Amino acid sequence: MLVTEMETALLVLSFLGFLSIVVEDFTKIDKAKTTLFFGTLVWVLYFIAPPNGFTTPELMHSLNENLLEIATLWLFLMAAMTFVAYVSHKGVIDGIVNRLMPTHMSERRLMLVTGLFAFAFSSMADNITATLVCITVLVSLNLSTDKLLRYIVLVVFAVNSGGAALITGDVTTLMIFLAGKVKIADLILLSLPALTAVLFLSFALSWSLKGQVVLVKREVIIPTGDRIIAGLFLATIIGTIAANVAFGIPPVLSFLFGLALMFMAVHFLNKDEPILEYVRKIEFDTLLFFLGVLLLVGMLKELNVLEHFPTLYEKLPVIVANYSVGLFSALIDNVPLTAALLKSGIEMSKGEWLTLTYSVGVGGSLLAIGSAAGVVAMSKIPALSFIAYLRYFGYLLMAYSVGFLAVVAISYLL
């Protein structure tokens, strides 16, 4: 009975941890503090009263598995953020914007360009890097808070949509591909509905925008050394994708190697540059937030909460269940959710697996805490709270539904 009561307590505390993110606007307590508190608390209690008579080595194995996933994300974020901090500080991103964007542009056109860029860039890079780059560009335009939030919401949805369409863009897509459920050609078809959803959302969010965006261009002189570092950043992104596809090298290892190359390159190109100082410019509150959230998700996994989702397919038609799983992925990490579905032995056609690939990849965009892109955006934009993002839920749900229906239509062709 004690174990049952402890499991109930752990579930309640995990729920309170997620709830603390939602009510941040009212409590005025930073979500990084509350999620870290509840995330560590549930694991401490898990060791004090382990369920099912688990021994200490078994508990350590479970904790180490979760910490390994967290450490991988932390190190990847650290490498990506350091790169972005350097090229941003050196004016490389401003220089690219000055070259590519016109001096005057309507706000509606800017919305469309933002969605297309985020979609395309996230197909090549990871969602976190794509989000950071897009946010840096948008913040430089000095938009009003209300308008900036619209663009950021589109960025989160677009990077998740672009990532879901390729095995290099989203972990869940790669998992489903490696399980033999879909093929590369199928995923290429998936990119069309995903892009359709992004275009729908960009038009919906820009419908009431009437103004013009004036880009104040200034001459940005980028030294040769900084251009080399920017090229190294791009090469790291492309190399990470190629190395993963060709040799199965984990993206975190490739990105850390790219970061090490950057450190060495800066040393020889500009010996006076305090390159390690850029590591200190990383928003560690973002990393702590990720740590807390993933500890909470890990506890839900240990309590076998995620294993109940396959029962949806016993109660609902497959297409309806896949659509619903996408909604659940806005609350629960899509990686363990996808793993649970793959291990459950559910039988689906290729087209149905394609709809699941879309739903778990894009569904996380519905809530700010549902994807890494959303969490990063919340940490970088103070005005983007959980509640502020929730105001656009209707737009996001319609866009998600449009894309899902388009995938269903394509699945009939398969």
Image (cartoon, helix red, strand yellow):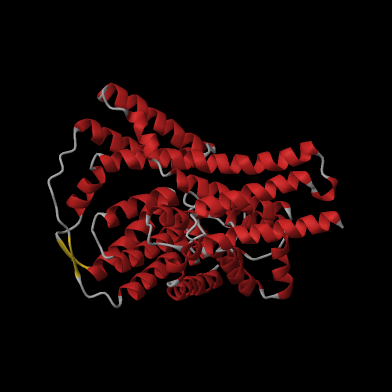
For the residue pair 377 and 182, the one nearer the viewer reads as: 377
The residue sitting at 38% across, 65% down in the picture is 154
Left or right relative to 163: residue 381: left
Can residue 42 be seen here? The reply is: yes
For the residue pair 25 and 167, the one nearer the viewer reads as: 25
Q: How many marks?
A: 0
Query: Which x, y percent locates residue 409?
Result: 51, 74
Task: Kindly indicate the quadrant of the structure image that contains residue 219.
Answer: top left
Residue farthest along the right direction in this orientation: 1
For the residue pair 372 and 42, the one nearer the viewer reads as: 42
Q: Quadrant of the N terminus?
A: bottom right
Residue farthest along the bottom direction in this orientation: 208
Query: Which x, y percent locates residue 269?
Result: 26, 24
Query: Which x, y percent locates residue 407?
Result: 51, 69
* Residue 287 vertical position relative to residue 378 in the rendered view, above or below: above
Q: Quadrant of the C terminus?
A: bottom right
Can residue 251 be seen here? The reply is: no
Left or right relative to 373: residue 219: left
Task: Kindly indicate the quadrant of the structure image that contains residue 9.
Answer: bottom right
* Residue 207 vertical position relative to residue 298 in the rendered view, above or below: below
Left or right relative to 305: residue 79: left
The residue sitting at 55% across, 46% down in the picture is 291
For the residue pair 281 and 359, the one nearer the viewer reads as: 281
The residue sitting at 80% across, 58% down in the picture is 5
* Residue 204 vertical position relative to residue 354 in the rendered view, above or below: below
Query: Which x, y percent locates residue 173?
Result: 54, 55
